[in-house]
Amino acid sequence: MNDQGGATISRGLRAALSAASEDGIIYDLAGIAGRYATLVEELPGVAVRFAMKACPVDEVLAHLAAQGAGFDAASPNEIAQAVRTGVPAGRIHYGNTVKSDRSIAEAYRLGVRDFATDSLEDVEAIAAHAPGSRVFCRLATSGEGALWGLSQKFGCSGADALLVLEAARRAGLTPAGLSVHVGSQQMTTEAWQDAFERIGEVLVALAAGGILLDHVNLGGGLPALGYLDRRGNPLDPPLDKMFAVIREGVERLRDLAGSELGLVMEPGRYLVADQGAIKAHVARLSSREQLDGERRHWLYLSCGKFNGLYEMDELQYRLVFPSHPDGEYVPAVVAGPSCDSDDAYDHEHSRVQVPSTVASGDPVWILSAGAYAGSYMTQGFNGFDPLPHRSVRGEPVGAR
């Protein structure tokens, strides 16, 4: 069975994909629990706050909460959803530095007391609408080495962080910590090393001014393992080396702090991406000569950019054609079903290998789609519905 590189699928997820008669996203809860177990084994003493935006699915959130995770929320709606899982408010972090007065007040009403910030204006608003709360100042990072760098909209310089946390102290807030984000789907260890250096420098400078922090939030960025790059080659992040660098960095920060320093991480796609898959179907495989004279095959799927595959501008998902285990394959451009030219993924030199005999209605499994595929969907662009979702418990998965 061709699956563009041999990605593994758990038996429970494979069975669910085979049995599904309609399109949808399927999450393997046992696989998610196994990935969580690996994380806490690799990074002992680091608290996990799952980034809800990666997979705001009630069953997934409840399963992670049962394992001991808390949540990184970016809006009052996400906070309310986190609260419904039963986790205490102390395990919910308002990680968005972009928030209105109204949103701050609502988060405070819901019991949240940990707020990310990166500006004096935001500190003033938190002091007014969430008095006495704890603030974490987010430091800017370059985002180099990540598929999505997150280097512009969030974070401030080290110099600004000193001003922000000093202002928080004067305003009656608790300057509790620093936070970073090395970029989503980070592929290098150097990014983590740079982040620890930035944090360490600011920790020392804050201590010199009498501000002793009790936490550092390392944010997200841990990569999924099952993606392909834009050319169709397997992405191979050095995950074990990343864990080693993070462990070393944590010890170094604790030495610099001179006291017990709590550590938090906010993984998203690392926990869920490889544990979810989309059951879709072929709308059509066609062949057309383009204006440049090249004849291209086009694989039109029942889902695309607006209902599940938003992230294919930066990566490829592995595709499985279960009804075509053998035969001739042709390179094709992958496109969604909508009447929108942006709903196509024609990366240079990266056509997807597709069975030449696929027909309309044939099933397609889209692997490593457990992160963001659901949360990025529109509410029915061009009349194509969002994909429904369900979960399977599968078999218990060990830490490794």
Image (cartoon, helix red, strand yellow):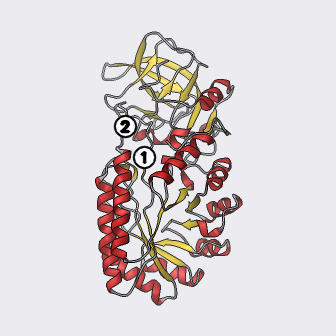
Q: Callout 1 environment at 10 Å: few (<14), some (14 to 19), or many (20+)?
A: many
**Secondary structure of the residue carrying numbered label 2:** loop
Closer to us: 176 or 116: 176
Residue at the extreme top of the image, as rendered? 327
Q: What label sits on residue 93 in the rendered view?
A: none
Closer to us: 107 or 380: 107
Q: How many marks?
A: 2
Q: Position of residue 295 (x, y in %)?
A: 36, 17
Q: Mark 2–mark 1 contact, CB under 8 Å?
A: yes
Q: Is residue 292 left or right of residue 321?
A: left
Q: Position of residue 116 (x, y in %)?
A: 49, 70
Residue 372 visible here: no
Closer to us: 250 or 288: 250
Q: Residue at x 65, y 29 (%)?
A: 16
Quarter holding residue 181: bottom left
Mark 1, residue position: 223
Above or below for 242 versus 98: above
Q: Callout 2 environment at 10 Å: few (<14), some (14 to 19), or many (20+)?
A: some
Mark 2, residue position: 235
| Residues at marks 2 and 1, CA–CA distance in whole angstroms | 10 Å
Quarter holding residue 301: top right
